[in-house]
């Protein structure tokens, strides 16, 4: 193994809760494993523990059904167990260091702005932020309260966009590495609404201004909710029955390819796999 090569870090973040960070982080991690990449997952939202629980459910389901599906390594990191943020940062660094043998570290974060969350954003080579079609989600990217008075090209940045900007600056000054940011529209309704069109238009115009890529979107499909208790994903063959399921799988593949090709671009090596 090339010991000098460190794992590539993909952080799933958004200061808004319930946008699909944990669900898509799990699907991304599993799709990468199906593509023969080695992956370790970190649930930094360990007090809630959604990603951790999904992977535990997966282990149990595989055992019960005698299946040999890929299961990523999972670290449950509970910020509440540390009395200071500095202690939590040190512990997290140690955990990440212990997992440098894998190709990819997939980090799921809390749906709120915390000091530890900010630190984790700086660790990202690629940050992926799911966003739903709600104007409330968009408000964290650009302050839409003034939309009537101003063109969205001149509206002030929202709180999350400002936070990411600060972490980008901090990362660049410390490591000279650029943080690539991908925004993903999640839970997109198949029936096109005016709000949907409006939000897409704003996101497209914000992309060069705020400095994010607008990645392939993911539709709103109940299959994502149904699979949680089994820890299964739409990529697992078991239970693949409906057209919605197959479409969801294709969408996850496209999103994964998009993120992996960005990682390849930013990585000095052409292949993100480790040479053993
Ligand atoms: N594309 C989708 N279609 C349908 N349901 C989805 C989709 N993505 C996520 N969900 C559902 O939305 C809910 C919230 O998803 P998830 O827990 O992944 O969000 P989160 O951003 O991690 O939330 P939190 O900030 O609370 O951790 C879950 O019930 C999940 O199953
Ligand atoms: Mg979550």
Image (spheres, grey):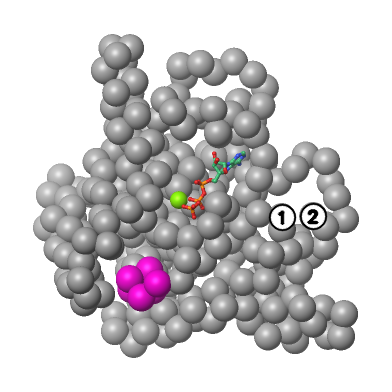
Tag 1 or tag 2, which sits nearer the N-term? 1
Residue 92 shows in this picture: yes
Above or below for 196 versus 151: above
Q: Dot 2 lies on which element?
A: helix
27 vs 53, nearest the viewer: 53
Q: Is residue 203 left or right of residue 95?
A: right
Give the x, y percent position of residue 179.
Answer: 43, 72
Q: Quadrant of residue 16?
A: bottom right
- Residue under label 2, please give it: 196
Residue plotted at (35% across, 80% down): 171
Give the x, y percent position of residue 247.
Answer: 64, 30
Q: Quadrant of residue 123?
A: bottom left
Mark 2 nearby-residue class (10 Å; few <14, some 14–19, many ≥20): some
Residue 189 highlighted magenta (yes or no):
no
Q: Quadrant of the C terminus?
A: top left
Q: Which mark is residue 194?
A: none
Give the x, y percent position of residue 114.
Answer: 40, 72
Q: Is residue 10 left or right of residue 111?
A: left
Give the x, y percent position of residue 41.
Answer: 30, 47
Tell me whether circle 2 and circle 1 mark residues in contact (CB < 8 Å). Answer: yes
How many angstroms separate mark 2 from mark 1 (CA)?
6 Å
Residue 118 highlighted magenta (yes or no):
yes
Residue plotted at (29% across, 38% down): 72
- Residue under label 1, please give it: 133
Above or below for 143 versus 3: below
Q: Which residues are magenta?
A: 114-119
Mark 1 nearby-residue class (10 Å; few <14, some 14–19, many ≥20): many
Q: Is residue 3 left or right of residue 180?
A: left
């Amino acid at each position: 193994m090339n010991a000098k090569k460190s794992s590539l870090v993909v952080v799933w973040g958004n200061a808004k809760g319930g946008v699909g960070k944990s669900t898509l982080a799990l699907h991304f991690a599993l799709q990468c494993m199906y593509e023969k990449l080695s992956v370790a997952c970190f649930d930094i939202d360990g007090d809630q523990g959604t990603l951790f629980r999904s992977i535990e459910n997966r282990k149990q389901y595989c055992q019960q059904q005698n299946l040999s599906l890929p299961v990523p390594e999972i670290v449950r990191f509970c910020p509440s167990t540390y009395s200071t943020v500095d202690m939590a940062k040190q512990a997290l660094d140690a955990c990440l260091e212990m997992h440098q043998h894998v190709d990819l570290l997939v980090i799921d974060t809390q749906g709120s702005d915390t000091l530890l969350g900010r630190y984790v954003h700086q660790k990202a080579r690629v940050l992926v932020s799911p966003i739903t079609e709600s104007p409330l989600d968009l408000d964290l990217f650009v302050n839409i309260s003034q939309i009537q008075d101003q063109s969205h090209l001149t509206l002030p940045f929202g709180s999350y966009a400002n936070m990411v900007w600060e972490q980008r600056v901090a990362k660049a000054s410390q490591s000279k590495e650029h943080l690539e940011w991908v925004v993903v529209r999640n839970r997109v309704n198949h029936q096109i609404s005016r709000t949907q069109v409006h939000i897409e238009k704003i996101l497209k115009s914000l992309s060069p201004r705020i400095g994010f890529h607008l990645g392939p979107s993911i539709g709103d499909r109940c299959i994502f909710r149904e699979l949680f208790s089994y820890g299964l994903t739409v990529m697992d063959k078991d239970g693949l029955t409906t057209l919605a399921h197959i479409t969801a799988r294709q969408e996850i593949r496209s999103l994964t390819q998009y993120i992996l090709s960005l990682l390849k671009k930013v990585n000095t090596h052409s292949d993100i796999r480790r040479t053993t």
